[in-house]
């Protein structure tokens, strides 16, 4: 998780004797944050203080030490804080919660979880799942996706998932015309007009959802969830309990985060089945990502990006060393509103853009004319001899979707994405 730069700091002030769900409140808060993949939390015990009651609590023999104030401090991305603060407010009935902006100068956590190989889906899933009903307007479904971490919304009836609305559903059946993750590149008037058009179509979640949804039980082993995702090419799965009720959602990133924790089975001669990051990266490395030169034209950049399902291309120097990365979202941000409909059609339908009679007009309405102008220069890389666990760690630290794979001299030899890594974690033959 990339936290460098602007973030949010949350402080929760409670007392030691406050409780929730039969346990100390500060423990319940920490458990919630950990279960929801928060970046981390720290519990601080005060030596003295008073709250709204005016009662002074002091750490002395004359006082009861378990009445001391406790502060839970949590720093995370703004969108993660926005998602989880409502859950915290449900837990904290009496106390104080503050949120302020902060600058993160260093964040180097261990990127993977320490879990037993036999861990179940419930151990890694997110429980703060946002769902819709079959009658929810499509516009509201899109707004839910824009506000949340997951780009899919389960559709629930009587507590049970009856469908799921994904990016693909909205594009193919909902008339969205552009993937949800590209909407952030649109100007406010463009986004408003698009949402208004969705409203005018009067479609509901039931009209566009995939039904029945593919789900996984919370008690299932992680390998079962991973096999489902790999076999069905899914990024996330609704999680249900034994009665079939929706209890959470598990993503590809949740599963990747469990691998490579450095644990050893109790019996090396008979290891438990699980997601193993102790595999060579070369097992899953691919070589089909298109590459560009810094001087490649905008037309060539669009052609490269739309030629692969990854929707991105690497830029290399004369020695084939990776120096930049171009994504579809960055390309969309570079064109003016006048040309954005054409750029969206190109990216969504994999059609050429910028070549022909209007090429000069395209150049005049684009901020940047070569690959060097539109690329991001920070390219996450991993050595070809690395293990999967190391590659996963690099990917999760920067929230990257692809890694450039290089040889000992730094030359590009391949690429891996999240789907490749998840497939590599499965036992051989799965």
Image (cartoon, grey):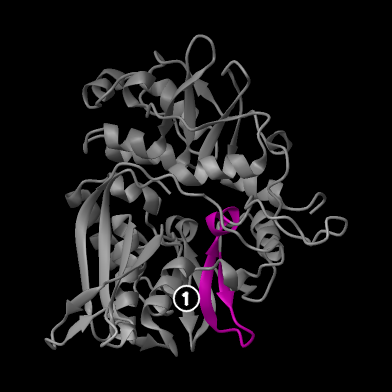
Magenta segment: 237-257
Q: Position of residue 315 (x, y in %)?
A: 46, 22
Residue 8 position (above or below residue 28): above
The residue drawn where x is 28% and y is 32% is 334
Residue situated in front as seen by the camera: 370 or 224 = 224
Residue 318 position (above or below residue 202): above
Residue situated in front as seen by the camera: 93 or 235 = 93
> Is residue 28 toward the left or the right of residue 69 in the image?
right
Q: Is 246 part of what is drawn in magenta?
A: yes
Residue 239 position (above or below residue 150): below
The residue drawn where x is 60% and y is 59% is 114
> Is residue 258 toward the left or the right of residue 428 in the image?
left
Q: Position of residue 130 (x, y in %)?
A: 41, 72
Give the residue at the far right of this rendering. 269
Q: Position of residue 37 (x, y in %)?
A: 46, 62
Residue 57 in sight here: yes
Quarter holding the C terminus?
Answer: bottom right
The residue pinned by badge 1 equals 155
Q: Is 166 part of what is drawn in magenta?
A: no
């Amino acid at each position: 998780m990339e936290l460098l730069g602007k973030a949010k700091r949350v402080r929760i002030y409670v007392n030691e004797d406050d409780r929730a769900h039969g346990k100390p409140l500060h423990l319940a808060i920490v458990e919630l944050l950990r279960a929801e993949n928060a970046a981390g939390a720290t519990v601080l015990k005060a030596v003295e203080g008073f709250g709204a009651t005016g009662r002074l609590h002091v750490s002395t023999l004359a006082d009861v030490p378990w009445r001391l104030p406790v502060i839970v401090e949590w720093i995370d991305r703004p969108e993660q804080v926005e998602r989880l603060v409502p859950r915290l407010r449900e837990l904290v009935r009496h106390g104080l919660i503050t949120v302020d902006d902060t600058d993160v100068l260093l964040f180097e956590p261990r990127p993977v979880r320490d879990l037993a190989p036999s861990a179940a889906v419930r151990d890694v899933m997110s429980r703060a799942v946002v769902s819709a009903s079959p009658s929810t307007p499509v516009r509201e479904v899109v707004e839910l996706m824009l506000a949340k971490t997951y780009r899919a919304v389960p559709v629930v009836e009587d507590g049970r998932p009856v469908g799921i609305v994904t990016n693909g559903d909205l594009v193919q059946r909902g008339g969205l015309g552009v993937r949800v993750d590209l909407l952030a590149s649109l100007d406010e008037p463009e986004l408003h007009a698009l949402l208004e058009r969705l409203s005018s179509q009067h479609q509901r979640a039931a009209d566009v959802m995939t039904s029945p949804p593919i789900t996984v039980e919370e008690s299932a082993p992680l390998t079962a969830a991973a096999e489902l995702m790999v076999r069905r090419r899914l990024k996330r799965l609704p999680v249900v309990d034994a009665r079939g009720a929706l209890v959470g959602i598990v993503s590809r990133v949740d599963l990747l985060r469990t691998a490579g924790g450095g644990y050893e089975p109790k019996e090396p001669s008979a290891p438990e089945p699980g997601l193993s990051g102790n595999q060579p990266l070369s097992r899953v490395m691919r070589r089909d990502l298109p590459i560009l030169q810094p001087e490649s034209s905008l037309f060539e950049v669009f052609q490269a990006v739309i030629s692969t399902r990854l929707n991105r291309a690497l830029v290399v120097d004369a020695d084939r060393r990776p120096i930049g990365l171009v994504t579809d979202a960055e390309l969309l941000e570079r064109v003016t509103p006048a040309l954005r409909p054409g750029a969206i059609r190109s990216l969504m339908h994999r059609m050429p853009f910028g070549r022909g009679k209007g090429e000069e007009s395209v150049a005049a309405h684009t901020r940047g004319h070569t690959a060097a102008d539109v690329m991001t220069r920070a390219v996450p890389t991993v050595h070809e001899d690395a293990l999967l666990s190391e590659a996963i760690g690099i990917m999760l630290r920067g929230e990257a979707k692809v890694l450039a794979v290089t040889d000992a001299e730094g030359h590009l030899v391949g690429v891996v994405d999240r789907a490749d890594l998840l497939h590599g974690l499965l036992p051989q033959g799965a």
